[in-house]
Amino acid sequence: MAYRGKRILDFIVALPASIITVVLTPFIGVAIAIEDGFPIFVRLDRISGGKVIRVWKFRSMIRGAHAMKKELDGLNERKDGPLFKIKNDPRLTKTGKLLRKFRLDEFPQAWNVLSGDISLVGPRPHEPEEISKYPPEFKRLALAKSGLTGLSQVMGASKLPFKDEVALDIYYVDHESFLADLKILGKTIAILFSDPTGV
């Protein structure tokens, strides 16, 4: 069960982040539209709190990118589980690569935090088809509220074996606390300044 005050912490951080997103949108939107047209945002299905939600992001991939996923399955670097990741994903636009380098594509998710769909800190929000392939012992993660950042992410989730990644998320859910969230947020900020691609 989440500690008291978690929602307050979400608002304290997400509200200014939402304002920054509004300020950035015209500039990022123009860059996206010039290179690859509209839309400038995407809404992606993710699991959080036991239900399917839609998270907002600035569009970093070409239109129709999701439909290409099956074609690129042979390039998937995460062979140890249901996750899909390609380091140099050919679907990324030039603008998208820049957005991802500095994690700017994820700023609109501050709106998801304000709406209560996700929290600042929590398990990584995975796709419904990924959750459906989780081993039984990990399926309870689908019931937890997901986060913008989390323990597995600051521990290098993209470089960890799948079972280690989800084990860290389960550990977080079982030991959730205000102090833990502050530590994870602090590590996230440190990583963003030193190596934005590391979160």
Image (cartoon, rainbow, N blue to C red):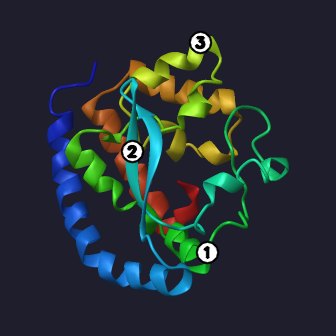
Which sits in the foreground, 114 or 33? 33
What is the secondary structure assignment of the residue under circle 3?
helix
Toward which corner of the image does residue 144 lie, by quadrant?
Answer: top left
Which sits in the foreground, 184 or 144? 144
Numbered circle sitting on residue 19 = none
Residue at 22% from the left image edge and 54% from the top image edge = 13
Residue 121 in the figure: left or right of residue 113:
right
Q: N-terminal of the two: label 3 or label 1?
A: 1
Numbered circle sitting on residue 93 = 1
Q: N-terminal of the two: label 2 or label 3?
A: 2
Of the residues shown, which amino acid type is indicated by label 3?
Answer: Glu
Q: Position of residue 60 (x, y in %)?
A: 53, 68
Of the residues shown, which amino acid type is indicated by label 2?
Answer: Arg
Q: Which residue is mark 2?
A: 54
Q: Position of residue 35 (x, y in %)?
A: 55, 84
Q: Position of residue 113 (x, y in %)?
A: 27, 46
Whether the residues at callouts 2 and 1 have beta carbons within 8 Å, the answer is no
